[in-house]
Amino acid sequence: MIQFFHVSKEYFRNEALSDINLAIARGEFVFLTGASGAGKSTLLKLIYKEEEPSKGQILIDSVNSTLIPAKKLFKLRRQIGIVFQDFKLLMNRTVHENVAIPLRVRGEKQADIEKKVNNALALVGLTYRKRYLTGHISGGEQQRVAIARAIIGNPKILIADEPTGNLDTNLSIEIIKIFERINANGITTIIATHDLNLMSLFPKRTIKLDKGQLVQDKRVEANP
Amino acid sequence: MRFVIYSIKQAMANLLRNKVVNLLCLGIIAFTLLVPGIFNYISFNLERYIDKLSENVEAIFYIKDDSDNGAIEKLMQRMQANLLVKEVGFTSRDQAKANFSREFPELKYILSEFNYSPFPASIDVKFQSDARNLIQVESFVRDIKNAANVESVQLNMDWARKIAMIKKFTTFAGLFLSAILLIVSIFIIFNVVKINIFYRRDEINILRLVGASDWYIKTPFLIEGFVLGFLGGLLAGGLLLATIKAFPLYAGFVFNIIKQLIDFRQLPQKIFWQLLVTGTAIGLFSSFISLRRFIKQTPG
């Protein structure tokens, strides 16, 4: 469970987030929306602790993340899979090498890495690109490499920052469907997007930010 | 084990990726270690030479003619009691005359004009081979010289004293230069590692975000510093050996004077190990502080 208690974030006296109170249950699928500069990326960065809140507390599975020392930060990060807006892939490495990174840092055995990379690539439909250099594949395929890397470590939380930003509608739908499949395995999924059309196709809980403030938290009623 | 193999692979990849920078760094480390190495080598040899001189240091105390046997015996006992002294011998006036006749037979006729021995009696003192501190020997001689029965002393230590001074100077100059050059070395490796970190900053950032521990990120760079320092020390040892071997070839007649002081045949193992250990320590230390700075500057 992710909980925000009166969280604010300032950058050089400019408030990026203001007094956010929020709770996301385990296994939930949430869209985080708002215009550019609304504070979506900042909120996500606070979850995986790339940024520290200026005020307030953030609890991840009842652990106050603001109290985690820098040396122990890797333990938190291993519970979170992140799909970055700019992908953050190593373009001079193969698709396989990029996807395997989270397992290598955990010191997993080569045989296990092979098996898990194959599974992750199969899930995002990219097995045929396994040995390609990441810089030589399309933007949509790179997006899926980033997703595969985010899920390979079997995280409790999956965060995606504008994962469909550069993709056409069909590909965007395909990507969100992949996230739905991942979420079906009980992984809490938070997707930041400003694509309202896309969100209308997937009725999920939607949290809206505007100028750093939480202005709407629309929950979807479960089908009777 | 997998982590160690990964770290070594990464370190080697880094070293090979920036070949020119790393080779340059290696050369500079080797040179900065070579200079103190040369001074250390000279100092080592001078010390050995001083030791050799100390082994042969002998003092002859000439006794006043009117000294009685009891007083001479007492003086000899006093000398023998000193820890610096290895052997004390007495040469009577007649023995001195006989020694002269034996050693200089062609001048024997001079003595025939004397019906007594013209030579004074003497106490001959040989010092322990480990009495390396020439200042202590000199102090002992000065002390005995003031005794009532001693006429004069023969002790030629000027040569040894001068060499001891040269050795002191060499050690001091060596230490001074070493300190400066070691700082230069540290600064260079620090910056080489910094360049390599900068080159891999995107990868490091990704590694941290996907859950790599600090040690997972740091270790390859530490190995890199270790390898650079170790190879630098090894190269410095090789260069020092080459310098030692080549010196007699280009030094000409100067060599004949110096070769008495310095053994040009071999590089003492002690100096070789010192170069290797110092190089490795510098490498590790420099990359460690470089990494510490980087990790502090990028808390994300």
Image (cartoon, helix red, strand yellow):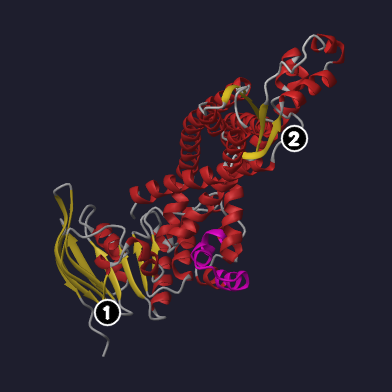
Vertical side of B82 occupied by B244: above or below: above
Q: Percent from the top left, x then y, of residue A60?
A: 28, 73
Report in which chain the residue with disc 1 lies: A
**Quadrant where the N terminus of chain A lies?**
bottom left
Q: Tell me the number on the disc at residue B266.
A: 2
Vertical side of A151 occupied by B258: above or below: above
As measured in the structure, the alpha-carbon distance from the residue carrying label 1 to the one carrying label 2 is 75 Å
Is residue B132 visible to the viewer in this orientation of the structure? no
Is residue A112 visible to the viewer in this orientation of the structure? yes
Q: Does B148 appear in magenta?
A: no
Q: Tell me the number on the disc at residue A25.
A: 1
Q: Residues within 10 Å of mark 1 (few under 14, many from 20)?
A: few
Assign a secondary structure to mark 2. Answer: loop
Q: Amino acid at mark 1?
A: Ala
Residue B241: name its quadrant.
top right
**Quadrant where the C terminus of chain A lies?**
bottom left
In-image side of B186 versus B152 (left or right): left
Q: Amino acid at mark 2?
A: Gln
In-image side of B208 versus A33 (left or right): right
Q: Does A112 appear in magenta?
A: yes
The residue drawn where x is 76% and y is 14% is B252
In-image side of B214 versus B7 (left or right): left
Which of B132/B248 is in front?
B132
